[in-house]
Image: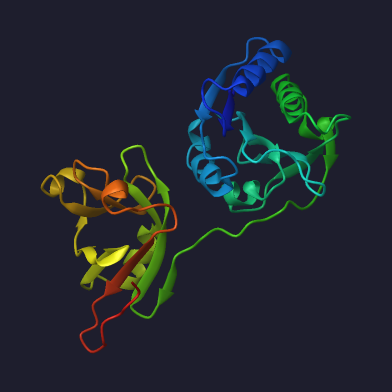
C-alpha cells in the first residue's frame, strides 16, 4: 500500500505541519504519513517540482503526494488530483504538475469542494478518499487540461552547451540542467572545458567521485540523476563561488579552427 507524502514550504515547527498531519491521521487512521521535503523557499515552484520529480518514484506505487507550495488557489486555478505512473498528486493548478511529470497525466480531477479557501482540509479529505480506495473521479470533476510551466532547459549553440544551476543540495553542490545525454551528444568525445559563473572557474575533466580531485579543488561529475553537478571536494562551492539557482554553466567543446567562445 502507498504512503502519504508532504512537500511543503513550512518549517518543521510550523503550525501548518501539525494541522495537516492531524487532519490526515483523523480522516484516515492507520495511514503512513511522511515528510518528503519541507522548508522549501516560499513560492518556489521550480524547486519543489525538481524535488518531487526526482523522489516520488522511490515511494510505493499508489502513494499520495500532497504539495503545499504556493498552494493558495488563484481565481482561475483550482485544486487537483493528478494520477500518473501509478501515483497520485494533490495540489494547486499553478503549473507545478507539468514540471513534475514532463508528460501528459493519466487522469486529472478538479476537486469539488464547498470551501475553496481551506486547502489543508481539502487536500486532507481528498487524500483520505484515495487512501480508502475511492476513485479520483468520485472526488471531483474530470478536466482535460492543466496549467503549464516551461522547464528551464540547457541550450546548444554550435560547439557550446549553455545551462544553468537548478538546484543546490545540502552540501552546497550545484546541480545543473545539463544532462549526460546532451553532453555526450554534443562533445562526441572531443576535448571540452566546463566553466561556472566565470571564465576563471573551470575544469576539463569529468570525475566519477568527489575524491577524484584533491580537497579544495573544483570538479564536475554526473550525479545519480544524470545531471552535471559542479562541486568542490570537501567544501561548499555555492558559498565559495557565490552560486545560486540561475547561475550560468557553460561547456565549450574544443574546435581548433574556431575563435574562443565568450559568455561571462
The quadrant in which residue 130 appears is: top right
Q: Position of residue 70 (x, y in %)?
A: 65, 41
In front of the other: 59 or 78: 78
Q: Residue at x 48, y 33 (%)?
A: 58
**Relative to 205, is 55 above or below?**
above
What's the colour scheme?
Answer: rainbow
**Position of residue 72 in the picture relative to residue 178 (left or right):** right
In front of the other: 141 or 157: 157
Which residue reaches farthest left?
A: 214
Q: Residue at x 58, y 28 (%)?
A: 6
**Relative to 152, is 146 above or below?**
above
In front of the other: 66 or 248: 248
For the C terminus, the quadrant is bottom left
Q: Position of residue 141 (x, y in %)?
A: 85, 39
**Position of residue 213 in the picture relative to residue 65 (left or right):** left
**Relative to 25, is 249 above or below?**
below
Amino acid at each position: 500500500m502507498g504512503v502519504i507524502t508532504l512537500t511543503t514550504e513550512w518549517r518543521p515547527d510550523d503550525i501548518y505541519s501539525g494541522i495537516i498531519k492531524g487532519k490526515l491521521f483523523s480522516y484516515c487512521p492507520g495511514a503512513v504519513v511522511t515528510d518528503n521535503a519541507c522548508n522549501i523557499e516560499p513560492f518556489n515552484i521550480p524547486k519543489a517540482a525538481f524535488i518531487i520529480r526526482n523522489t516520488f518514484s522511490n515511494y510505493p506505487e499508489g502513494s499520495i503526494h500532497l504539495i503545499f507550495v504556493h498552494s493558495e488557489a488563484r481565481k482561475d486555478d483550482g485544486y487537483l488530483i493528478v494520477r500518473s505512473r501509478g501515483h497520485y498528486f494533490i495540489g494547486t493548478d499553478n503549473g507545478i504538475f507539468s514540471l513534475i511529470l514532463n508528460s501528459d497525466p493519466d487522469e486529472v480531477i478538479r476537486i469539488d469542494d464547498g470551501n475553496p479557501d481551506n486547502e489543508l482540509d481539502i487536500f486532507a479529505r481528498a487524500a483520505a478518499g484515495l487512501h480508502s480506495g475511492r476513485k479520483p473521479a468520485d472526488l471531483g470533476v474530470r478536466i482535460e487540461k492543466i496549467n503549464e510551466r516551461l522547464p528551464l532547459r540547457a541550450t546548444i549553440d554550435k560547439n557550446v552547451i549553455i545551462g544553468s544551476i537548478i538546484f543546490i543540495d545540502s552540501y552546497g553542490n550545484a546541480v545543473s540542467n545539463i544532462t549526460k545525454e546532451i553532453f555526450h551528444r554534443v562533445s562526441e568525445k572531443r576535448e571540452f572545458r566546463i566553466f561556472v559563473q566565470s571564465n576563471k572557474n573551470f575544469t576539463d575533466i569529468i570525475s566519477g567521485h568527489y575524491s577524484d580531485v584533491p580537497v579544495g579543488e573544483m570538479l564536475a561529475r554526473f550525479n545519480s540523476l544524470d545531471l552535471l553537478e559542479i562541486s568542490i571536494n570537501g567544501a561548499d562551492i555555492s558559498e565559495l563561488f557565490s552560486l545560486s539557482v540561475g547561475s550560468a554553466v557553460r561547456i565549450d567543446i574544443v574546435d581548433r579552427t574556431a575563435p574562443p567562445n565568450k559568455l561571462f
